[in-house]
Amino acid sequence: MSQKRTIELTCPMCGKPAHFTLWDSVNNVLNPELEEQLLKNTFALFSCPHCGGQNYVAYDFLYHDMQKGVDDISSAFPGRKGQGEGECFA
Ligand SMILES: [Zn+2]
């Protein structure tokens, strides 16, 4: 099951409060659009409604890969995803 919640954060560009939807866990079969966002690196992209600025929100979430049958802790921060390739998550 995919779980999300909305948090309030402060825009790092204009300093105004804004809301951001944060996913605690992602299921790539139930929410294929989220997997696509992950691949495009727009998953954790915050768009400020006040100034229009965009910034990445770095947080970790549980990723359920139904095809591989594994649960993995992934990072929503671009560049960190996939770093663990070749390592063993037994
Ligand atoms: Zn802003």
Image (cartoon, rainbow, N blue to C red):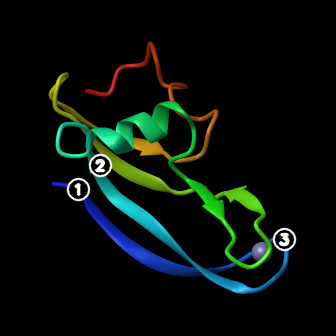
* Distance in Å between CA atoms under marks 3 and 2: 28 Å
Kind of residue indicated by mark 2: Val
Q: Which residue is mark 2?
A: 26
Residue visible at 39% across and 53% down in the picture: 61
Q: Looking at the picture, which amino acid does disc 3 mark? A: Met
Q: Which residue is mark 3?
A: 13
Label 3 lies in ligand 1 vicinity (Cβ under 8 Å) = yes
Q: Is residue 4 left or right of residue 86?
A: left
Mark positioned earlier in the residue sequence (1 or 2): 1
Q: Are marks 3 and 2 in contact (CB under 8 Å)?
A: no
**Distance between mark 1 and mark 2 Cα atoms:** 5 Å
Residue 78 in the image, given as x and y percentages of width and height? 62, 39
Beta carbon of the mark 1 residue lies under 8 A of ligand 1? no
Label 1 amino acid?
A: Ser
Q: Residue at x 74, y 79 (%)?
A: 50
- Answer above or below: position of 46 versus 88: below
